[in-house]
Amino acid sequence: PRIEAIELHRLEVPLVRPFETSFGRELAREVLLVRVRTDRGDGWGECVAGRDPFYSSEYVDQAAAVIERYLAPALLQAPAHHPADDGHVSGVLIDDPAHSAGIWVDDREQHAEGAGERGTSAGAAASIAGVPLAASVAPTLAFVAGHRMAKGALEAAVLDAELRTQGRSMGACSGAVRDWVDCGVSVGIAPTLEELLDEVTGYVEEGYRRIKLKIKPGWDLVPVGAVRELLGRDAMLQVDANTAYTADDIPLLAGLDAFDLLLIEQPFAEEDLATHVRLAEASSTPVCLDESILDVTTAVDAIERGATSIVNIKPGRMGGYLEALRVHDACRAREVPVWCGGMLETGVGRAANVALAALPGFVLPGDTSASARYFAEDLTEPFVLGDGEHRGQLRVPDGAGTGVSVREELVRDWASSPVVTVR
Ligand code: OSB
Ligand code: MG
């Protein structure tokens, strides 16, 4: 496909309950959607940047500006792409009538298909073959420093468009090994302990397989202890500090060891791997990085230094789904468990996250909760937790691209500013 226009859609979607973290309180999700229009159909991507530069230095006004001014023009001006000069995909042109046109597949995928596997013999890399346009996005945009969330939204939209033209689903072609994924839920800081316990009780009744509590100084040992008591010893429980602590808090954080947590997520600043190493040495609770993991290089570095023994993968934070696959592979090769984080995405971003969570290295439940945990109405068909053996799980979409369709009337109705089109 050839990119003909890139649209930016800004929306404000109310949350069903306020979401409070150590860095602030949100009542609505400010959503930036990117639609890539190609000569062969459209694709959608969701930017994970928040309204304010609190979780990360990126924020949504800035992401929209950098896309409009730098990134979208660069993609539109990139020379028509030929798989042969891609470097990422080397292979032969397969003329498969199942696809609307010939697609390039590399040798690895042919072997996997030939073996009747779902693309995952042990150690096989989980990259998506045959998506030269999506694979060209990161190299084309590399001239802009940083702005990973903005880049990730564009790559997601291009990948969706390209896979749709091929009739291939994101999960199946990136090496998914399961049709349903285990879901956890991220629980915000509550006004009172009683409200926290009520909220957690509700999620347990809905079937969530793991609880994550947001913590901050003054909201840590007591609420975590109370929730552990409520859940019982065997339930999966973890905490996320979103960088709210400093090295002086290491003894306090080591006190969380009493609660048998799965992990403690990002207690210290994004740049501060050294203090994470010190906590890992002082405590028995595994340290898991979120904000610090910017790409595969920082992931490997953090693992090798002992700053993280579990990794939270968010494609948007790493500049895209293809980099997220590289982080997955690097972690898997080092036997480091990963799980799929979330950024309060609508169905557009959630669909890609759920597909990612179906990969083999994702051995812990993700922050891939049902649509109803966030929104009264979702922008796509809603994600709903399963029943019976699929209690606490979401089904991996199997339609082409992300496998969900965007309800364009809602995108219009909930718009918070006019659509920007770059041609
Ligand atoms: O740190 O994981 C985080 C939401 C917004 C920004 C950062 C984080 C979160 C969450 C919620 O924890 C995850 C979700 O349910 O989408
Ligand atoms: Mg986090």
Image (tube, grey):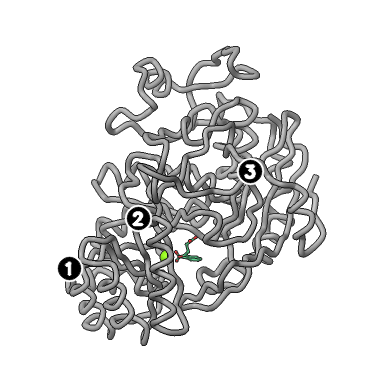
Mark closest to the chain's N terminus, 1 or 2: 2
Asked if the residue under mark 3 is in contact with the one under mark 1, i.e. CB atoms within 8 Å, the reply is no
Rendered residue at 28%/60% (across/down):
236
**Is 129 located above or below residue 139 in the figure?**
above
Rendered residue at 32%/52% (across/down):
364
Rendered residue at 68%/43% (across/down):
75
Q: Position of residue 96 (x, y in %)?
A: 57, 13
* Residue 201 or residue 71, whichever sits in front: 201
User: Image quarter for residue 18?
Assistant: bottom right
CA separation, marks 2 and 3? 30 Å
Q: Say what secondary structure mark 1 lies in.
A: loop
Q: Dot 2: within a 10 Å radius of its alpha carbon, few (fewer than 14), some, or many (20 or more) residues?
A: many
Q: Say what secondary structure mark 2 lies in.
A: loop
* Residue 355 or residue 294, whichever sits in front: 355
Q: Is residue 138 left or right of residue 126?
A: right
What residue is pinned by disc 3?
A: 157
Query: How many numbered marks does the figure carry?
Result: 3
User: Image quarter for residue 252?
Assistant: bottom left
CA separation, marks 1 and 3? 41 Å
Dividing the image into 4 quarters, which one contains the C terminus? top right
User: Which disc is residue 284 wearing?
Assistant: 1
Q: Position of residue 271 (x, y in %)?
A: 40, 70
Q: Amino acid at mark 2?
A: Arg
What residue is pinned by disc 2?
A: 209
